[in-house]
Image (cartoon, rainbow, N blue to C red):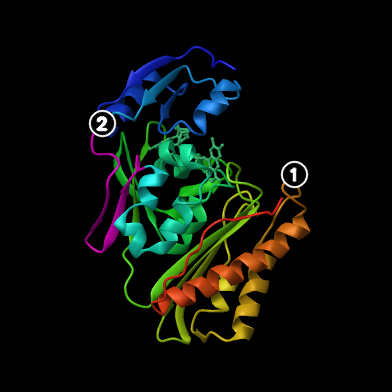
Amino acid sequence: MIPAPYEYHRAASLEDASRLLLELGEEAQVLAGGQSLIPLMKLRLARPAALVDLNHIPGAAYIEQRDGQVRIGAMARHAAVADSPEAAAIPILHDCAAGIADVQVRNMGTIGGSVAEADPHGDWAPVLLALGAGVVTTGPEGERTIPISQFISDAFTTVLRPAELVREIRVPAQVERMSGAYTAFKRCAPVYPTASAAVWVNMMDEDFCMEARVALGCVGLTPVVATEAAAALSGQAITPHAIDRAAEAAMAAADPQTDLRGSADYKRLLVGTLVRRALLASLARARGERVAMGHEYAAL
Ligand SMILES: Cc1cc2nc3c(=O)[nH]c(=O)nc-3n(C[C@H](O)[C@H](O)[C@H](O)COP(=O)(O)OP(=O)(O)OC[C@H]3O[C@@H](n4cnc5c(N)ncnc54)[C@H](O)[C@@H]3O)c2cc1C
């Protein structure tokens, strides 16, 4: 399919993109990696009158650690995040970025586009929720830093205002005994997951967890922050019983829909398994072990 006709504008900076969006009005959209927008345009499910291209903005794709935070520019591609030293130091970032779709999508798709898209099946949001990330935006009213937990307001909906753009994702740098892991279950690589789970722990020692966060993907209209699951781990010795309680609480927090990926009951069971796996990997990493983690695929 060929997209409906549109005007093309090349932004020189994010401020320029915001100005262009303001000038062009509501029918204009920004183009980042195009991995969600272009297929929608080809199917004519999206018909923007104008595209403002962010791909030629210099210095919008950085990944760096500064002032106790890992800062990821909106235009950083999934593949660049996966290969970065920052993702080696915070392996949950690698778990997520290295498993998104296939190599073509990872080479083009951006973290800013994914967060702005707010697809309930997207991989980034649960990971960023588990990490307690912030989203830095830029727009006509200046810059804002919004906790990711407040950024996504509904399915495919964020609190971005007209002509406001995602500039940067900020993740607190991790110190010793803090770690997380992410896993998602998929039918095959180039599709979105059936369910996903991100877990982050801050351990006092090998057994006692001071704080935990658990976030789930694909089992609600927005990513689910599994508060009760985190409470089952926070301020607790991590025993098999605590792990069982966390997995059960995560299953209870999930609100999945039956669809072509599976029944609601199946997805809820899957959540229990994914949370257990992500938690065990997080605990091992917090002990300093190297654990390979990532997306898991159905044996077809
Ligand atoms: C076959 C296929 C499989 C995929 N599978 C997965 C998967 O398993 N997991 C997953 O997470 N993703 C998956 N994706 C999506 C992929 O991760 C995209 O990269 C992502 O959804 C959108 O990022 P993008 O840079 O391509 O954004 P675009 O497609 O360019 O833009 C998406 C939307 O965000 C807006 N936007 C883009 N950048 C900004 C910004 N900086 N500020 C404000 N608004 C902005 C655009 O206007 C548009 O509305 C898949 C895509 C394809 C084609």
- Cβ of mark 1 under 8 Å from ligand 1: the answer is no
- Return the x and y of residue 79 as percentages of the image width and height: 40, 45
Q: Can residue 110 be seen in the rendering of this structure?
A: yes
- Which one is in front, 5 or 183? 183
- Return the x and y of residue 15 as percentages of the image width and height: 27, 32
Given the image, on which type of amino acid does mark 1 rest?
A: Leu
What number of labels is visible? 2
Asked if the stretch drawn in magenta spans residue 65, the answer is: yes
Q: Can residue 160 be seen in the rendering of this structure?
A: no
Given the image, on which type of amino acid does mark 2 rest?
A: Ser
Q: Is residue 270 left or right of residue 28?
A: right
Secondary element at tag 2? loop
Bounds of the magenta segment: 58-76
Q: Nearer the viewer, mark 1 or mark 2?
A: 1
The image's mark for residue 13 is 2
Secondary element at tag 1? loop
| Image quadrant where residue 66 sits | bottom left
Residue hosting label 1: 260
- Return the x and y of residue 69 as percentages of the image width and height: 28, 60
